[in-house]
Image: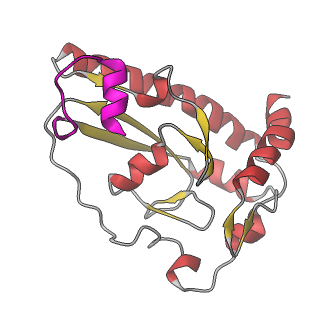
Amino acid sequence: MPIEAFRTGFPGTGVTASDLAVVVWALPQTAATRRDHRACAALPSRRWSLARHYGEAVNDRVRDRLVRALVDAGYPAVAPVRLPAFGRATSERFGIASRWSERHAAYTSGLGTFGLCDGLITERGKAVQFGSIVAAIDLPATPRPCGDRTAYCLRLSGKECDACIRRCPAGAISAEGHDKERCFAYIRETTMPFVED
């Protein structure tokens, strides 16, 4: 929760959850990166891999600079994914999970809805990385354009679509949803060694 992240960075403060704002941004992939990635079947394109890796490094710099600018202006702020407590955990209910999810922060902030694959789908698609910070600052909430948490997923909205099922090289997406363990194993055993070469 945002208050837990904030209190990790600023323990002992009298700040409450209602004093906080979560600021979220989206960094979309370029048309060239999307084009190259569409042409691949079993492994990510080189351009996609580089954009993902270096894009997250840029995202970390955005997080750090925004936190620093807000703190310098008198608004205590933290980037939850930059805190030592951030990491993966195993949830009894959900399996592999993060202690802070940029996708969930983006959903809550009205930037998209979830798909069958568990990814966040924006109005413009899924080729995007998200970042967020939590700050003790009074900002108006952005209204969420959709009431349904899966509104942008064609299949979960009742339309004919199996694009993510067909596209998943790990076979981790089915009509029943996303098999996180199978997906993570594929990333760890197949994709990561390829990307690191």
Counting from the top left corner in percent of width and height, residue 174 is at 73, 71
> Is residue 3 depicted above or below 67 in this figure?
below
Quarter of the picture containing the N terminus is top left
What residue do we see at 60% from left, 37% from top? Answer: 89
Q: In this view, does 71 lie to the left or right of 35?
A: left
* Extent of the magenta region: 1-19
Q: Along the line of sight, which residue is nearer the eye, 91 or 86?
A: 91
Residue furthest toward the top? 72
Q: Along the line of sight, which residue is nearer the eye, 125 or 103?
A: 103
> Is residue 158 depicted above or below 181 in this figure?
below
What residue do we see at 40% from left, 20% from top? Answer: 64
Residue furthest toward the front? 92
Quarter of the picture containing the C terminus is top right
> What colouring does the structure picture have?
secondary structure
Is 6 within the magenta? yes
What residue do we see at 38% from left, 42% from top? Answer: 25
